[in-house]
Every structure is written in structure tokens, then in C-alpha cells.
Amino acid sequence: MSILVTGGAGYIGSHTVVEFLAKGEEVIVLDNLQKGHREAVMTGKFYEGDIRDQQLLDRVFSENKVEAVIHFAADSLVGESVQDPLKYYDNNVITAQNLLAGMVKHGVKRIVFSSTAAAYGEPESIPICETDRKEPTNPYGETKLAIEKMLKWCDQAYGVKFVALRYFNAAGAHPNGHIGEDHQPESHLIPIILQVALGQREQLAVFGDDYPTADGTCIRDYIHVSDLANAHWLALQKLRRTDMSAIYNLGNGEGFSVKQVVEKAREVTGHPIPLKIAQRRAGDPAVLIASSKKAQQDLEWKPQFNSLEQILQTAWNWHKNHPQGYGK
Ligand code: UDP
């Protein structure tokens, strides 16, 4: 039986493919390569195409015995989602609906879904627990939450069992040095800081220093991408073991402000990394920190790269050796 990974050529997807292969799973990747990189996929079986394409899904499900789907393929930029919400409903919600229809049609009953901390919106308390209020402040979080709800009803109606994983801030790169983060254009904090360290940008624009935090900059919970990848495999084990749906936060439980991340990156890279203070970015909550107790207990998940320094060091290793990402 195979595991179908949608969006397996993307940042978190490609790290998850490596993790599943290391665990001896048979992996098939489906990716439209709009954002993903073919070079990031270390497995043989690759389908290039879109999950909107029901005929392609029929082909993938007929040509392979698919036990479960790990569903990454989506758009994931908070700012862009505020500018163009319909793009997010189309690329996230409609595609998930199509994928689920394909799964139901072909009798595939397990799915691990990439959800997000953005589903909570402005948190009611810190750290955030899975049962806390969910009022997304941007369409990205809203569409991911809509898919979680779609999954719940599909479980009830068709017996499709799911684990939704609410990621906090994925960061870092595989310690093997072969895969890492490469978005075009880049919008994420850590890769942008490292591009400054590489001399590819002059400075970092800090989006707001008037938030209600100690230094005025936003606080996020950075979690290493390989630890996220491992959680997906553990989530599949949980589905295999219990056949019960569940939702988990995945984070380190520790928050760092934008300025603290920059400070640590200065230590790791030895570069001064100049800053300028810019406008707040629409849709950004001040503080997001996870409680991942539930995942640690139920999934026996133990993050291995849990210091900001390890996260920055693996990311720096990737960026230094691949200054143009997968491009050149
Ligand atoms: N950020 C920033 N400057 C940048 C990119 C990001 O100040 O050029 C801030 C952003 O406002 C947020 C944090 O860094 O508070 C992490 O942003 P990122 O886009 O990496 O992840 P997100 O929190 O949107 O998932």
C-alpha cells in the first residue's frame, strides 16, 4: 500500500516525503509544481498535476493502492490571502473538496491534513490549546479551518478518518543539507533574514514594532520542519492504530520575537543583519505560541530540533550551500 503526498514537492511536503521513505513507507507524490520543486522530491513515483483535476486523481488512485493521503498542497501566505481571498477559497477549499471526493470514490479512508495556527486568530490565552476559540483573522486561516470542518463531516458521513495538524511556524532545513526552504518570492522571516546574511538583500523589514510584546515585535513559535515531518508519520501510525480522527497543535511551546530571531541569526551567521521598522502586515496576530502537549502525549511526538539555534543553523547550512535555492 502507498501513501499519497499532495504538495510533496513543497517545503514541508518534501521533508515529510524524506521522513516517510526513511520509515520504509511507499510514497507517491502529486504536485502541480506551481510552488514546489521537482528536485526536492527524493522518490521515484511522481505525478505532476493539480488536485482539481478529477481525471488525474482517478488515475493516481487507480494506478496505485493508496492507503492514506498526506495533504499539503495549498496556498499558505497570510498577507496574500488578505489581498486575494477568493484565490485561497479556490486553491485550498475547492481542491480539498475535490481530493476528498476522489478519496471517497476510491475507498481511501485516511488523511493527514496540514492545518495551521492561523485557524485560531487572536488567541484567547497563551499557550494555545486545540479547544481554544477559533476566529481566524485572515482568509488563509479561515480556509484551513473550513477544511478541518469538511473533514469532520466527511468522517461522519463516509468514515474518512483524519488527523489535522495545526502547524505553528515551520522553519529550518533537513540536516542532510539536500532540501530546505525555497519560496519564490520569499516572504518568510527566517529565509529573508538569511538572504540578508548572504548579501542578497540589504536589510530586513520588521513588520511593526508597536505590538503589545516586550520589544514590540510579533512573537511566534518556530518548529523545525523535520520535527513536523516526523509528526505526520506518527499521525499516520495513530490512524492505523485507532482509526479515530483528531486535531493536534505542533509547535515548540516557546515564543521568539522577530527581534530575538534576528539576534540569534546574527550569532549563527556572524552577519550584522540590519533592520528597518516597517508597517504592520495585515492579518498578523501579536503572539502565537502552541501547547503541543496533546501531540506529545497521544502521538508520542518528541521534537528533536527544539532550540532556535538548531533551527537557524540547519536553515543557514541550506541557504549557504544553495544561495539560489533549487534554482541553480
Ligand atoms: N516578518 C517580518 N518581516 C518579514 C517577514 C516576516 O517582520 O520580512 C514577521 C511577520 O510579521 C511575523 C513573523 O515575522 O510576525 C513570522 O512571519 P512569517 O511570514 O515567517 O510566518 P507566518 O507567521 O506568517 O506564518
Image (tube, rainbow, N blue to C red):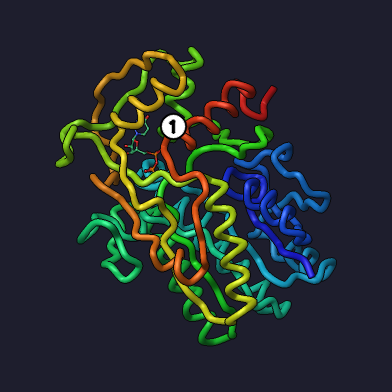
Can you identify the residue that label 1 sits on? 190
- When the figure is inspected, residue 248 is found, relative to residue 204, above or below; the finding is below
- When the figure is inspected, residue 197 is found, relative to residue 45, above or below; the finding is above
Q: What residue is drawn where x is 17% and y is 40%?
A: 213
- What is the x, y in percent for residue 52? 64, 60
Secondary structure beneath disc 1? helix
Q: Residues within 10 Å of mark 1 (few under 14, many from 20)?
A: many
Could you tell me the amino acid type at mark 1? Ile
Snapshot quadrant of residue 70: bottom right
Whether residue 84 can be seen here: no
Q: What residue is drawn where x is 65% and y is 46%?
A: 14
Snapshot quadrant of residue 42: top right
Query: Ligand 1: does it lie within 8 Å of the C-beta at label 1?
Result: yes
Q: Is residue 7 left or right of residue 140?
A: right
Q: What residue is drawn where x is 65% and y is 66%?
A: 69
- What is the x, y in percent for residue 133? 26, 67
Tell me the quarter of the image containing the N terminus: bottom right
- When the figure is inspected, residue 154 is found, relative to residue 178, above or below; the finding is below
- What is the x, y in percent for residue 185? 51, 30
- What is the x, y in percent for residue 135? 28, 62
Q: Nearer the viewer, residue 260 or 161?
A: 260
